[in-house]
Image (spheres, rainbow, N blue to C red):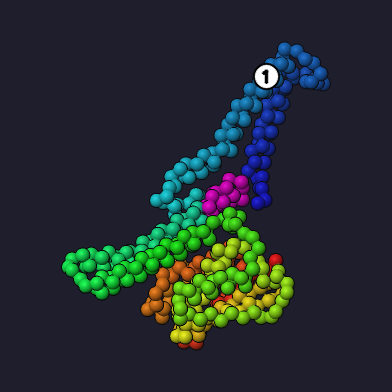
């Protein structure tokens, strides 16, 4: 930031003029004779001049300091009134061209970011509580009904299966929330090392096919290479695998054939991983919102999910300095492309 000195210079020049004026006036009053050199003779009267001048300088400096610090005092009083309940309040910027004005503007910008963060947190907590309430209520209702009257072993088995399904949904939601929280960490605090994307993809495929026997993942590589660096990036293996699992799982879930096609593509200094399906697609009006936490497209409401997956993917890619692109057509399918810098 370029420091502006108009305010400081204004008061310094005024102080200097006043001090010089005091010296001139005192010298004329005490030594009116012509040709007198004030600094050539050291006597009592000269000491008196210096003493009076020093006292005058202190008094002037005191009042000038009060004048200079008055805008700072106003800012302190304004800041003291701002709390978590009224973060919309802002400092009054009287002169944006001096240091005090720049301080107020910078503080207002900080408040803007804090207010945005608080609102996002409130919305996040509200959505989390709503998403957790539904499976928890279903779980409690199932168990309470099973206690009210005797049932056959088959009935109890069905109750346990439904309760287990609700518990799994809760576990999946809580895991998603935890992963989402991890991506909000400062990038410097995320442990990173060399990660081979092809190996992480194979691990992700194993995780998905074990959990869903009818899901099919078709993996292709753009071209064969003996150079491991082409498929390696600097990143966090757990987070990268989480992103891949979410995209492949979504592709299979929203496709009638439960199939997702994955390609590794080399692009100069970048390596891209493409996830394509032939599912229900994403409406054009929803494309810009799909990476918001808990957002779900209207045509996907009939499918199980909580709207965390894509938000998590986008934040993971962003934390790895990558880019994510999406193209989609209704009833034809969707393609997500993740681009990273390879090592």
Q: Is residue 288 magenta?
A: no
Rendered residue at 66%/68% (across/down): 232
Rendered residue at 47%/45% (across/down): 78
Q: Secondary structure at mark 1?
A: helix
Rendered residue at 45%/56% (across/down): 118
Estimate the x, y position of residue 138 in percent, counting from the top left. Answer: 29, 68
Q: Is residue 217 positioned above or below 236 on the image?
A: below
Estimate the x, y position of residue 107 in percent, counting from the top left. Answer: 54, 50
Range of magenta residues: 94-110
Estimate the x, y position of residue 210 in percent, counting from the top left. Answer: 48, 74
Rendered residue at 64%/60% (across/down): 193
Residue that badge 1 annotates:
51
Is residue 239 at all visible to an observer of this figure? Answer: yes
Q: Is residue 104 magenta?
A: yes
Instruction: From the viewer's side, name the closer residue of 36 and 43.
Output: 43
Query: Quadrant of the image for the C terminus?
Result: bottom right
Q: Is residue 92 positioned above or below 210 on the image?
A: above
Q: Residues within 10 Å of mark 1 (few under 14, many from 20)?
A: few
């Amino acid at each position: 930031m370029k420091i502006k000195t108009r305010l400081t210079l204004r008061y310094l020049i005024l102080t200097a003029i006043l001090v010089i004026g005091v010296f001139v006036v005192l010298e004329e009053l005490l030594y009116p004779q012509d040709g007198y050199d004030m600094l050539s003779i050291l006597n009592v009267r000269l000491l008196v001049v210096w003493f009076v001048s020093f006292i005058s300088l202190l008094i002037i400096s005191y009042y000038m300091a009060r004048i200079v610090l008055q805008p700072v005092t106003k800012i302190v009083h304004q800041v003291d009134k701002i709390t978590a309940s009224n973060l919309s309040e802002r400092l009054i910027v009287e002169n944006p061209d001096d240091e005090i004005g720049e301080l107020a503007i910078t503080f207002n910008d900080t408040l803007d970011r804090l207010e945005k963060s608080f609102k996002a947190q409130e919305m996040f907590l509200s959505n989390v509580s709503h998403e957790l309430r539904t499976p928890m209520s279903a779980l409690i209702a199932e168990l309470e009904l099973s206690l009210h009257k005797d049932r056959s072993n088959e009935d109890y088995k069905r109750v346990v299966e439904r309760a287990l399904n609700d518990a799994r949904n809760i576990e999946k939601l809580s895991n998603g929330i935890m992963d989402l929280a991890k991506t909000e960490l400062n990038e410097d605090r995320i442990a990173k090392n060399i990660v081979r994307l092809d190996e992480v993809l194979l691990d992700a495929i194993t995780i998905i096919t074990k959990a869903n026997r009818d899901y099919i993942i078709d993996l292709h590589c753009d071209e064969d290479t003996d150079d491991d660096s082409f498929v390696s990036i600097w990143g966090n293996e757990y987070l990268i695998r989480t992103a891949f699992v979410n995209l492949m799982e979504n592709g299979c879930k929203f496709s009638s054939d439960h199939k997702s096609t994955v390609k590794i593509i080399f692009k100069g200094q970048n390596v891209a991983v493409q996830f394509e399906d032939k599912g229900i697609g994403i409406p054009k009006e929803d494309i810009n919102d799909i990476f918001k936490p808990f957002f779900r497209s209207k045509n996907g409401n009939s499918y199980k999910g909580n709207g965390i997956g894509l938000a998590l993917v986008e934040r993971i890619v962003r934390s790895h300095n990558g880019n994510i692109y999406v193209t989609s057509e209704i009833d034809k399918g969707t393609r997500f492309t993740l681009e990273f810098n390879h090592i």
